Image (spheres, coloured by chain):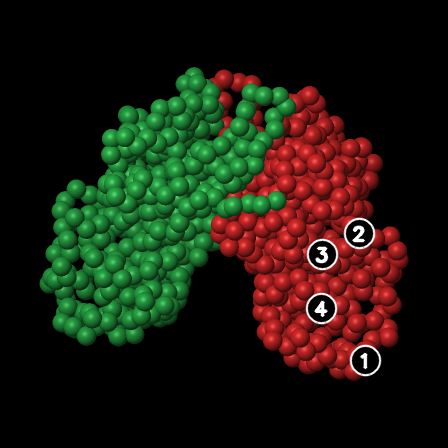
Chain colours: A green, B red
Amino acid sequence: MASWLSIPVDSHFSLANIPFGIISTSKSSVPVPAIAIGNYALDLSTFTKAQGFSSLPSFHPHLDVFHQSTLNGFAALGRPVHRQVREYLQAVFKNDTPFPSVLKENAALQREALIPLSEVTNHLPLQIGDYTDFYAGRNHAFNLGCLFRGPENALQPNYNSLPVGYHGRASSVVVSGTPIVRPTGQILTNPTATPKIPVFMPCKRLDIELELAAFVSTGNKLGQPVPIDKAEDHIFGLVLMNDWSARDIQAWEYVPLGPFNAKNFATTITPWVVLIDALEPFRAQGLEPGNRDSLLPYLREKRPDNVFDIKLEFELRHSKEDAPTRISTTNATNLLYSFSQMLAHHTITGCNLRTGDLLGSGTISGKEPKTQGSLLEHTNGGKEPITLSDGTTKRIFLEDGDEVILRAVAGDVDGAYVGFGECIGSIAPAVNFTF
Amino acid sequence: MASWLSIPVDSHFSLANIPFGIISTSKSSVPVPAIAIGNYALDLSTFTKAQGFSSLPSFHPHLDVFHQSTLNGFAALGRPVHRQVREYLQAVFKNDTPFPSVLKENAALQREALIPLSEVTNHLPLQIGDYTDFYAGRNHAFNLGCLFRGPENALQPNYNSLPVGYHGRASSVVVSGTPIVRPTGQILTNPTATPKIPVFMPCKRLDIELELAAFVSTGNKLGQPVPIDKAEDHIFGLVLMNDWSARDIQAWEYVPLGPFNAKNFATTITPWVVLIDALEPFRAQGLEPGNRDSLLPYLREKRPDNVFDIKLEFELRHSKEDAPTRISTTNATNLLYSFSQMLAHHTITGCNLRTGDLLGSGTISGKEPKTQGSLLEHTNGGKEPITLSDGTTKRIFLEDGDEVILRAVAGDVDGAYVGFGECIGSIAPAVNFTF
């Protein structure tokens, strides 16, 4: 598909994508819905006011969702509506658009509604109700298990039977670009001493976790589980996510109820939600087929290819003067469970999901060197430093001023990439406490 | 303090209390703020419209909060405003009110705004952002630890250093009276067999957890921890809570990231929020003083009496024909940490709290027989059945149709009780799955 709009061939936001987000600008500080296309955002509020959806009459009862400050209203309309709107916007932008008067030949509306991405401020795309983080990257779970318990007992007995997950902190999910203040907390600096006396200090083992995450579109009622073959219809789309982790705080606090302060200080997501329909051409099989017989029926999918072939990478930049160092490249096929399986498992007890809920995949790692989604794995538990691209600077965990850049993209044809853009965060110094 | 309104001497909602909630009625289905007083609710929307706050001019800029469908707006005004409004409403209701024309001598407004509690439908008092559950009842943690690991290793090494907590599920917090559908999930029916193969079945070990919980009034910004001596000013008030737990689902799923499906299907709270100011006369010392030297400074409170003397009980009724059986009586002084300590710990990493966030205390148990806040402890891990009041019916865990009633009240002077009312839930049969 070619567009009348100039879209760089390597853009994450090709005509095949059409991801949705929330933006504001220096001229208009009120956050409004938008799509990303090439190097531009299309302001959907302005587009709607200018009769941009005049040729999509089925959507006319819902136009108000594009004058809201989050995408919750749009997401709640359900997947058939998302599909119609995405396909309509693709038609508006394609070379031989059937609706040339809407935008292609409307220079005034182009000037008003097409805003260079460089001039846009991104906001959280949806108001998040609950945030749940899973642990579906089996290589990551195995790698961490090896560090803690050795390879024989690396995976817990439940791991291959259910998507392990835990409730995360919704309030501190932030959009790419938000600075991350180094957390302070209780740390056991000498784990072998008796008695165990923790120290109050800034985190020294600040790590990243490379994940994908799904936003819930339509929810379910309390007491009414979502069947596995309907689960994907409850997903609005995916974002790329960095679930920052304080490994030293985690080690002391996490028994017996799981991570808490080690994770609650920040989670960064990309601003543009890539719809499931845009990822449809990239279906692939995960670490095991989604319909394998060993799964209990409530988790068994009809198709084996229940995850997506999405290339993932993360880079670290330790100073503005130096080029970023590519630390890792991996792929979202390194998941044992799909988002549909996570969602079905989440609701099997009757737990209700709501529009805007966020489900994280867990850290995605490969098996080979330089494919791990966290520094803890990369450095073999903090024992083997990484040398950065300047040839001298070493890193085990993150230091103040470090910038972390995650990227994710599906497809390998120029002009047809379906990407997530960048998920960026830099580390600010810890709070200075006085007691 | 005596009132011109007839208030039963044993009422939880004496003039010393004035708890806030959200109600609707068969005549007016729009949820509105209210207080409970004796056997009545005072509809604050109607009261406001009828110039009920005419003699509290400092509150006039905020009157709109009493026309909202949650208490978030009121809670966000902060503790000094809550105190003024509560004291004003006490003044309106007391025998020698300085404002007799407001309500005492206004029969028309009494008829309109004073609604018998029996005619009121209660709603969740606040829209909950995040829900966090702590584990601050040390006797409960010790009892569970004994069941799992024996008395020598019952408490984990971190327990006396920090308030252990985990993120819970906000979407499934429901108000007292909501039926609880028995959850279904993965259960390891034969834990000693190899390999470990779970069964998909309804929970057989459905339990209660007797807790108190605090609602957050004003939040904090991301990256800006709340100091311990300011923490209580961020608390709106307390409710009584039943954190329903599926022990068999929990046993299989909870390693290594903590409870998930075992807890996410429902949490029941009382509808009336008891303000911290109402509990002020009942300050008491918890299991250890709040200012003990062994605490890190960020958790050390100025005063030793940092918890509240609140009597707690739970009853079980297995049929409508039989009287409820009192299972347990205990006291909120069985906490090792206060809500201020939980809140300070929660934010020490920079995690932001928001108005409406809910912090659970964890299960509160005593040390003596019949003082435990869960059936798992009561029945010694499911081994010793309880005989109910009919003399023949036995219970280990909850069966379909069982009704659980929690109660909490501070004070021992007739006419001056500060109580929470009842936190009720009855068990509905599991969903009937077909695959």
Which chain is mark 2 on? B
- Residue drawn at 12 percent across, 62 percent down: A4
- CA–CA distance in space, label 2 to label 4: 20 Å
Looking at the rendered structure, whether the residues under marks 4 and 1 are on a common chain is answered as: yes
**Secondary structure found at label 2:** helix
Q: Is residue A1 above or below residue A430?
A: below
Q: Which quarter of the rendered picture does the N terminus of chain A lie within?
A: bottom left
Looking at the rendered structure, whether the residues under marks 2 and 1 are on a common chain is answered as: yes
**Secondary structure found at label 3:** helix
Which chain is mark 4 on? B
Question: Residue B385 vs residue A255: left or right?
Answer: right
The dot on residue B276 is 3
For label 2, the residue is B282
- Of callouts 1 and 3, the N-terminal one: 1
Q: Is residue B370 above or below residue B233?
A: above
- Of callouts 2 and 4, the N-terminal one: 4
Q: Nearer the viewer, residue A40 or B430?
A: A40
Within-10-Å neighbours for mark 4: few <14, some 14–19, many 20+: some
Looking at the rendered structure, whether the residues under marks 4 and 3 are on a common chain is answered as: yes
Q: Position of residue B398 (x, y in %)?
A: 67, 39
Q: Which quarter of the rendered picture does the C terminus of chain A lie within?
A: top right
The dot on residue B84 is 4
Say which amino acid is labelled 3.
Ile
- Of callouts 4 and 3, the N-terminal one: 4
Mark 1 or mark 3: which is in front?
Answer: 3
Mark 4 or mark 1: which is in front?
Answer: 4
Q: Is residue B60 above or below residue B345?
A: below
Within-10-Å neighbours for mark 3: few <14, some 14–19, many 20+: many
- Of callouts 4 and 1, the N-terminal one: 4
Contact check, label 2 and label 1, Cβ < 8 Å: no
